[in-house]
Amino acid sequence: MAITQHDCITCKIRECSILNECDKDTLKAISKFKLTKSLAKGKRLFTEGDPVEGVCFIKKGFLKVELNGKEDRPLILKIAAKGNVLGYRINAKHAVHTCSATAVTDVQYCYVPYALFDKISNKSTVLRNQVINLFIDELELIKKKALTLAHKTVREKVAEAILLLAETFSCENEEPAFQISFCRQDIADLVGTTKEQVSKIIKDFEKEGLIKCTAKKFSYLDLVSLNKIAFFKYPSV
């Protein structure tokens, strides 16, 4: 069978995903069983508590991955973008999703039923190790998230969130503007605070000349100063 541009072997997005180190046999097997799907903005890819039915490789768009917190208030763990993988699991004990994933833009992704992905990964040591490493990275992310929520000030949290959004939505130093798909409430859910506090800090940053923004569009970021705020090291006593 001829390889098409839709196959994993020739897919450019594979270079930033867990499939990057896989051999051709593994990539051909995934290509054979995958389905190309789309998800409209605002729709759920899966909900916390749903059974894990398939592995999703994000090709285009952004999703917020969140936990249902106190009084049904969500806490956003991360933003998933192209190259990210959702819906994987390590073993049979991970039978349900422990978080939800909602599209914040229109999303395109490749879907592989879990039973088939499991068979393929069991035959590929490289892919299996990549999945394990991904699981470890997720644990590390949750640990860092907990430390941020517990120890950082709201100002530091918002500065870090803006830097994350800038990186995620492809802000480069040479690009003067970028558009995010997050509202103030989403940013609040990302840092574990309120929309009002986020709005106040953003206004403070504007007054200080650190950012320029209108609604969801940032036309300027002082990346150096925001980094100093976000990752400020307190002197040891």
Image (spheres, helix red, strand yellow):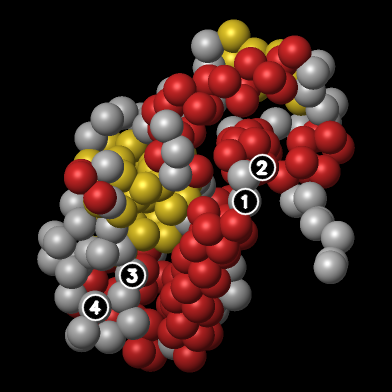
Answer with mark 2 or mark 3, whichever residue precedes in sequence: 3
Residue named by callout 4: 94
What secondary structure is marked by label 3? loop
Where residue 200 appears, as percent x and y from the top left, is 57, 20
Give the residue pinned by disc 3.
88
Q: Quadrant of residue 147?
A: bottom right
**Which of pointers 2 and 3 indicates the residue nearer the eye?**
2
Q: Which residue is mark 1?
A: 152
Q: Along the polypeptide, which appears first: circle 4 or circle 2?
A: 4
Residue 168 shows in this picture: no
In the picture, the quarter occupied by the N terminus is bottom left
On screen, 116 above or below 187?
below
In the image, which is nearer the foreground, mark 1 or mark 4? Answer: 1
Q: Is residue 91 visible?
A: yes
Q: Which residue is mark 2?
A: 156
Query: What's under tag 2, amino acid-wise?
Result: Glu
Tell me how far mark 2 sits from mark 3, CA to CA. Answer: 32 Å
